[in-house]
């Protein structure tokens, strides 16, 4: 559980840094990278909570 929290926070930080680079440089590749990181982070969070919910129901 603790590892998942740290991994989630690091991924969100990486997305924020990528968006900051985009704001600073204006290069669209940083925005794309930030969106991809954010998309996979949210997907992983949804699957994690689905597994936790299924475990509690079973």
Image: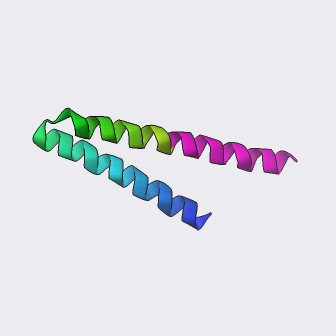
Determine the residue located farthest toward the front in the rendered image.
29
x then y, percent, for residue 31: 27, 36
x then y, percent, for residue 44: 56, 45
Residue displayed at 79% across by 44% down: 54
Q: Left of 53 or right of it: where is 22?
A: left
Above or below, 6 against 27 in this view is below
Q: Main secondary structure of the magenta part?
A: helix
- Which of the 4 image quarters holds residue 33? top left
| 49 magenta-colored | yes
Q: How is the image coloured?
A: rainbow
| 43 magenta-colored | yes
Above or below, 8 against 20 in this view is below
x then y, percent, for residue 6: 49, 63
Q: Where are the magenta residues, as a range?
A: 42-58
Residue displayed at 70% across by 42% down: 50
x then y, percent, for residue 15: 34, 47
């Amino acid at each position: 559980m603790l590892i998942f929290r740290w991994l989630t926070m690091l991924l969100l930080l990486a997305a924020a840094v990528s968006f900051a680079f985009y704001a600073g440089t204006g290069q669209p590749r940083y925005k794309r990278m930030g969106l991809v990181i954010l998309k996979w982070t949210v997907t992983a969070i949804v699957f994690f909570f689905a597994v936790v919910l299924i475990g509690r129901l079973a």
